[in-house]
Image (cartoon, grey):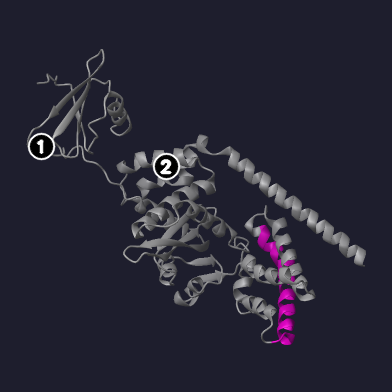
Amino acid sequence: MLNLSHQTRVFLFLEPVDMRKSFRGLCLLTESVLKEDPASGHWFAFINRRQDRLKLLGWDGQGFWIWYKRLESGGFQKPASDPKQVQVEIDVTQFTDLMRSLALESPVTQADETPVKMLAPGTGKTSTTYLWAVLGDRYHPYTTFSFTESRSRAGPAEFFADFEGILVSDAYIGYEFLHPYTQGRIQIAGCYVHARRKFEELHDLGPTERTATAMGYFRRLFDIEDELRQLSDEKRHEQRQLRSRPLLEDFKRWMDDQLETLRPKHDLRGAISYMTTRWECFERFLESGAIPMDNNASEQAVKNPVMGKKAWLFFGSPAGGRAAAVFYTLTATCRRLKIDPFAYLKDVFERLPFCNLEDPASLTPLLPDRWLDDHPESELQIRTTEANAKSARRRTRRTQRRKALERAGRKRR
């Protein structure tokens, strides 16, 4: 029999343990799983899968002892859990749902989606599921993800059920139908990068005067936006009225003229119709300096799971898809805010069990932007430096291109 003082505690390792483990293996389990010091003077009990063998690990002040017992019949009975020492299971989706609801308080949001394969047990095949990225503005800097088992419009209808404002997206019908579905509560802003891509593909296949003219309009519009990038929303709106609006109106007249002369099945007609049939959406960015011309930010966000798919290939179940949405919501927001994800997640998971998940106020200090205010040392300065250097290189290239075009124009004259 063991003589235990009233100060000695016995910790029971709940998972089955390989009884071949000796001092080092049991000490590692004690430190890594039980988070206790094996040399603390307490005792640590380990039981095998059949529950007929038990090992006790202890420290007597001079060295470790192991007591081993094997039952010839029957098994050890694990004691009932102490109601005062229960294990807390955290449903992190309540926290990420809060992040999504705050992102949707933005007057302008962006959205995009990416397909992910999911195992279909019993069929030997996979089905196609989707992760949807929804981004808030700079005042609600959360990059959130949601999981659905199809690409039907029911997904966006659910995500944006309470949203009112501008949604910047591509021309997928799942986003476009939100405008009539919400009776105009959601306004769609078109993405000029997607529109340009259609002209660019034709231009790369075989440059013509028409495709070159279209690409010239896009280039000048994006050059203006590049020059206005550092301005406030109010100043950017003012400059767009002076510079972008006349250019866009000229572009629209040119496209209308082309539609009158192009053959019905001409490839360029499809690229032009993509814009003219949605012209109200493509004019939307002129209404406010806060509305971007593209949804590049959301396209960049979905690259996180796109790159991940190369490693993990597929989801094992819908639960795996929902877990991935939670994971990417937290890590993509850390990436956006340039936060050390390990430091953030470690602190959040340690504090969440003591929060009232039904009370948003108790979760507010754990939101990534609020957490960063309290932990400025966890900001990854190298990411900021890299982003600034990348932006500077991009601005330099565009400036050089503009100057080259100006020189070429003067030579032609």
Residue 277, compared with residue 387, is above or below; it is below
Is residue 15 shown above or below 405? above
Of circles 1 and 2, which is in front? 1
Marks 1 and 2, the one that precedes in the sequence: 1
In which quarter of the view is residue 88 placed? top left
Amino acid residing under circle 1: Gly
Prevailing secondary structure of the magenta residues: helix
Q: On screen, 289 above or below 349?
A: below
The residue sitting at 51% across, 63% down in the picture is 111
Q: Quadrant of the N terminus?
A: top left
Residue 330 in magenta? no
Kindly identify the residue that appears in the image at 67 percent across and 49 percent down: 391
Magenta-drawn segment: 235-263
Q: Which mark is residue 75?
A: 1
* Residue 140 visible in the snapshot: no
Compared to residue 119, the image places residue 54 above or below, namely above
Residue 11 image position (x, y, % from top left): 21, 30
Residue 317 visible: yes
**Are discs 1 and 2 less than 8 Å apart at CB?**
no
Q: Which residue is mark 2?
A: 345
Quadrant housing residue 26: top left
Relative placement, left or right, of 294 versus 93 is right
